[in-house]
Amino acid sequence: MTTPRDGHRIGWMLAIAASAALAILGAEVEGLRGLHYVFKPLTTLLVLALAWRQPGVAGRYRHWIVIGLVLSTAGDVFLMLPFDGFVFGLGSFLLAHLAYLVALRRRGGWWRVRWPVAVYAVVASLVLARLWPGLPNELKLPVIVYVVALAGMAAQAASVWREHSDASTRIAAVGGAFFVTSDALLALDRFSAPIPMASVWVLATYWVAQGCIARSVRVVVDQDQASVASR
């Protein structure tokens, strides 16, 4: 049976999906570029609102996730500006991943489960090897730093999931995996070889990633409330 809370949650997810679809349409259709400028940051702000409006108290976890989403919104804006804001966007998302890392640390130790570190290290190395010939010299160091932070965040999410397996850690780990996928597609399209309909795949996986990370805040709240109710 669907509860009012479930209906509210579904409504938020539908709003995010509709906004994301309009942003992607604007990115793919030249004459509709204005849609992209409006709905790309709006979609991430809706994801931010989803995390912010969760009932109950998720503590510092929600605090750092919201900071990461604010920084991600700034990154969205920098990446779509008429001038080349790639470096500023890269810096914004680097800080966002660091915020997510701080949040994830509150749910488990630093990379206590080792295999996710090995898996994401291999993935990061393969992507960097493919990108390297096409990277401008001035971007090589910033990209290395960014890739290490991204892979570290995704590995931490997976490690925490295996250390403390529950719905919240699982959905955060899924979010980390989708973030790596999205950024790998974006980088390969920009610096290696064009990907057909790149905006569709990059943005769809990006908002799935952000939605999972925001949703993990709600699951933490649900678990806290269930714990209180059982006492």
Image: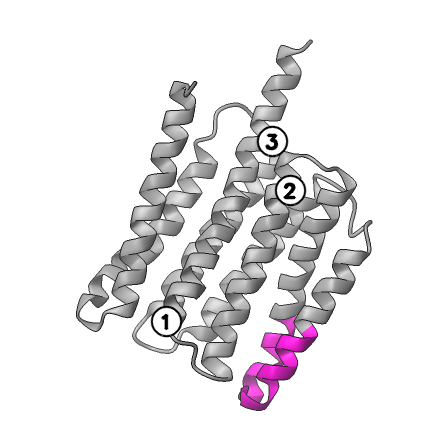
Q: Secondary structure at mark 2?
A: helix
Q: Say whether residue 180 is magenta.
A: no
Identity of the residue drawn at 38% across and 33% down? 10
Q: Quadrant of residue 5?
A: top left
Within 10 angstroms of label 2, few (less than 14), some, or many (20 or more) residues?
Answer: many
Residue 114, given in percent of the width and then of the height, sits at: 82, 56
Within 10 angstroms of label 3, few (less than 14), some, or many (20 or more) residues?
Answer: many
**In this view, the mark in front (2 or 3):** 2
Identity of the residue drawn at 35% across and 47% down? 17
Judging depth in this view, the residue of 195 and 65 nearest the camera is 195
Q: Say whether residue 132 is magenta.
A: yes
**Cα distance between the residues tagged 1 and 3:** 36 Å
Q: Quadrant of residue 6?
A: top left
Residue 227, given in percent of the width and then of the height, sits at: 66, 18
For disc 2, the marked residue is: 170
* Position above or below: 97 against 48: below
Q: State left or right for residue 52 relative to residue 95.
A: left
Label 1 or label 3, whichever comes before in sequence order: 1
Q: How is the image coloured?
A: one colour
Query: What's the amino acid at mark 2?
Result: Arg
Query: What's the amino acid at mark 1?
Result: Met
Question: Residue 220: which numbered mark, if any?
Answer: 3
**Cα distance between the residues tagged 2 and 1:** 29 Å
* Position above or below: 60 against 154: above
Q: Secondary structure at mark 3?
A: helix
